[in-house]
Amino acid sequence: MDVQQFDFELPEHLIAQHPLADRTASRLLVLHKETGNILHQRFTNLIDHLVPGDVLVLNDSRVLPARLIGEKEGTGAKIEVLLLKSLGEDRWETLVKPGKRVKPGTVVVFGDGLLRCICEESTDMGGRIVRFSYEGIFYEILERLGTMPLPPYIHEQLEDQERYQTVYARERGSAAAPTAGLHFTKEYLERIAAKGVHITTITLHVGLGTFRPVSADRVEEHVMHAEYYEISQETADVVNAAKEEGRRVIAVGTTSCRTLETVGSAHGGRLAATSGWTDIFIYPGYSFSIIDGMLTNFHLPKSTLVMLVSALAGKENILNAYKSAVEQEYRFFSFGDAMLII
């Protein structure tokens, strides 16, 4: 499959640069995957498409203020360090800019010495393994010195850092937000639960793959970066009961989808309480074992996420829906509008 098959025209002015004042004020494109029919609605209409017994699966990962700006010891050169994955014992996989200034042995100082790191080794794609040194609690220092690692297509500053967190974010560890969940307020989730919809959570810490474009010409040649996930016994029980009884499981976001499918495909269409690393790559031809529908945002052209939703709804249906979204001037990407595939 040629990656170019997943390309589409996207005017730059449709890339949302800031969140809406009201989380639930987004628009909602509803795509029926069997027929390709499209409805243009508001996000608050989501509840109308859910029925008692449905299971809504959220990703409760919390974004770290993972972008650190420091100075190279000895020269004072400005260095940006983006935390991607904890390796334990204060070692982290990171991205650094400019990479040519950070070689093994380089020390970077943050916050007048409150935090320091030494580069231990270089990795592929411009990555670095660094070890931090500090006094106190690392995550408290990070909250003081770090900022949200907004995607490169967002050029405006984020005034309220919590707007790049879901209202149910709990397990810290992501380098980017699971953005499909940004549309929910606690009150709206309570309304959905009151309708008889089961709401449960998984954890997947969004990592390096979010920042990597597809560089291969053929879809099958692309390699995903592994991300850490956890599924609780409670969530496994809720989802397994729904599958046994023929009730729908709807993933909120591609991260929830990838976690459910990773575990479900390994356990014959059932979930188990487990944790691990997933590099699952879902593209057309994939047979879903757990999810029946998905709430998601609008994604980058030729991205693995466009390929994932194409696997669920069909490539032609997705490209047609995206074309309609562009014509109707939906807002795209992290702070943009939502799509419900059912």
Image (cartoon, rainbow, N blue to C red):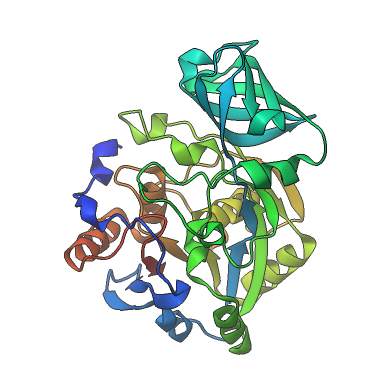
Q: Residue at x 63, y 14 (%)?
A: 121
Residue 268 seen in render: no
Q: Is residue 87 above or below residue 286?
A: above
Residue 42 on image: x %, y %: 36, 79
Q: Is residue 191 above or below residue 264?
A: below
Residue 215 seen in render: yes
Q: Residue at x 19, y 52 (%)?
A: 11
Would you identify the image quadrant in which residue 33 lies? bottom left
Q: Residue at x 47, y 65 (%)?
A: 294
Counting every numbered tag in the picture gives 0
Q: Nearer the viewer, residue 8 or 96?
A: 96
Q: Quadrant of the C terminus?
A: bottom left
Q: Is residue 257 above or below residue 150?
A: below
Q: Quadrant of the N terminus?
A: top left
Would you identify the image quadrant in which residue 86 lies? top right
Residue 143 on image: x %, y %: 67, 47
| Horizontal side of residue 342 vs 289, given as left or right | left
Q: Residue at x 67, y 42 (%)?
A: 142
Query: Residue reaching furthest bottom?
Result: 195
Would you identify the image quadrant in which residue 5 lies? top left
Q: Is residue 192 above or below residue 183?
A: below
Q: Nearer the viewer, residue 143 or 13?
A: 143
Residue 276 on image: x %, y %: 71, 42
Q: Nearer the viewer, residue 17 or 262?
A: 17
